[in-house]
Amino acid sequence: MQSYDRLLIGGKWDAPATPSVLQVISPLTEEVIAQIPDCSTRDIDRAVAVARASQDHGPWPHMPVAERIGILRKLAAGLRAHELDFARTQSEEVGSPYSLISAIQAEVAAALLDYYLDLGSTYPFEEVRPGLFSKALVLREPVGVVGAIVPWNYPLSLSFFKLAPALLAGCSVILKPDSATPLHSYILGEILQEIGLPQGVMSILPAGREASEHLVTHPDVDKIAFTGSTAVGKRVAALCGQTLKHVSCELGGKSAAILLDDVALDQIITPLIYRALPNNGQTCIAQTRLLVPQTRYAEITEALVERVRTLRVGNPLDPHTEIGPLVTQRQRDRVDGYIASGLAEGAKIAVGGKHPPAMTKGWFVEPTVFVDVNSSMRIAQEEIFGPVLVVLPYADEEEAIALANDSAYGLSGSVWTADQARGIALARRIQTGTIGINNAGLDPAAPFGGWKQSGIGRELGREGLEEYFELKSILLPPERPPAFAAEERAVPGL
Ligand code: NAD
């Protein structure tokens, strides 16, 4: 068992304020694999104090951008050097299939840094604008101390959705991973110590709910960048609203994959299933509502079910495994609850629905496909966050669009078709932040975020950097007197 007795506070490993500890439990063996300090509000206070000092007195926010970029390039190299350590750790603590996670954890985090550091070398942090009355020097200054709160499902890469733009912008960051999956953050802490970041710029505190809310409400924190469930996002946004603190929220989803009637099944089934069930279905952009033309319903459903039946369930560290265990017992209970609710509401299970009999330990659920689903059922409306898909038939494209938009969420989506132009025309009518044609996912250059209850604000792209600025306009001396200057205006007749 690994035992950690330090927290990264302002870039240094430091003893926690209290001796209390938390256990990390393996989703595969259900045994304790590590213990970490149980972060308290006093630890949050210490991290915020050093971040505040870094923000107000430098050097990080004030150094030339090129210097910050130089330091952050070392961070990207450090992530790549530890790529396999991160992958193994995430398989162990989250249950993510190694085959998936070894390709997309550290590499995505490093690629996000590459993208933002390239952008930063040409981005106009300052510009002079010709105004109506005077020129204005427009400054994009760091928003300040950032609390970055991330969930357990892709803990490293999701951290860099925030860290890459925030650090480039010149912010100091308190990163708050989920306390159930903190182990990757100890590898990250080691790298952060080695790259020459000034004191105070980075802290990592895997806090629980009480200490997390303390971070959210702390008066010396200027912005909260949150990724997690819609329920907690609403609470975080409401707390930030009390002091008008900057807040961005990346929240849940229930994304529709619309299969058009011209789709070539042999070409799309495998890529579609991978985008529907990544990370054991625990992915915000998973394409979990499959909308299928009535005219091809039987044929498409059969192909989906056959492919899902062949998914290999097992130990996440086995490179052949496609579906591992869910992250916690609580998460499996939640997924079991949705399966029971689907059956109670009249949907039918075409494949899966149980705990795999071969796995005697671990929080596994068989990959599951529900048919005979209608859009009002809870399994069609609510985010299940497990390996459970629902298939809904549609009569024509208008009904497909209506079904896709019949959701409180609007995070992702996809259209599967042999005709790209037809796919784009349909995608224009879907209420969502990102949608793919024979594709689903994201790209560092494309703004990513939610419509409706999937979030507020954007990550990735230029827009993701701009979330970490305060704007300041310095008006330069007027070149001519303002036309409205009172002393120059005589009222006629007086
Ligand atoms: P969660 O909302 O329970 O927790 C997310 C984070 O918030 C964790 O670090 C948690 O410790 C912290 N937290 C919990 N209560 C808090 C509070 N009161 N104040 C401050 N922080 C608090 O979500 P989860 O179950 O860990 O993650 C799954 C959810 O995240 C899903 O809904 C998924 O769709 C969403 N998600 C969204 C995106 C996106 O980019 N839109 C990406 C990944 C996951």
Image (cartoon, rainbow, N blue to C red):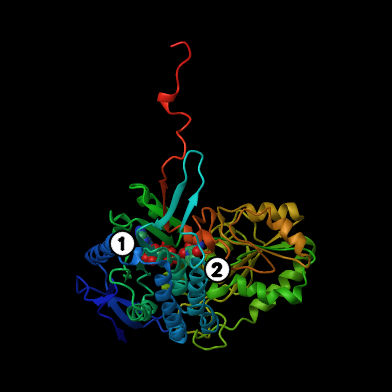
Q: Say if 157 sits above or below 54 in the image.
A: below
Badge 2 residue CB within 8 Å of ligand 1: no
Report the residue marked by disc 2. Answer: 444
**Residue 39 appears left or right of 433:** left
> Percent position (x, y) of residue 492?
48, 14
SS at badge 1: helix
Task: Classify 10 Å Cα crowding around label 2: few (below 14), some (14-19), many (20 and above).
Answer: some
Residue 337 visible in the snapshot: no
Residue 128's tag is: none
Q: Which sits in the foreground, 224 or 94?
A: 224
Residue type indicated by callout 2:
Pro
Residue identified by numbered label 1: 55
Q: Quadrant of ligand 1?
A: bottom left
Q: Earlier in the sequence, mark 2 or mark 1?
A: 1
Residue 321 drawn at (x, y percent):
55, 85
Does the rendering let one see residue 438? yes
Residue at 58% from the left image edge and 57% from the top image edge:
433
Residue shown at 77% from the left, 55% from the top: 396
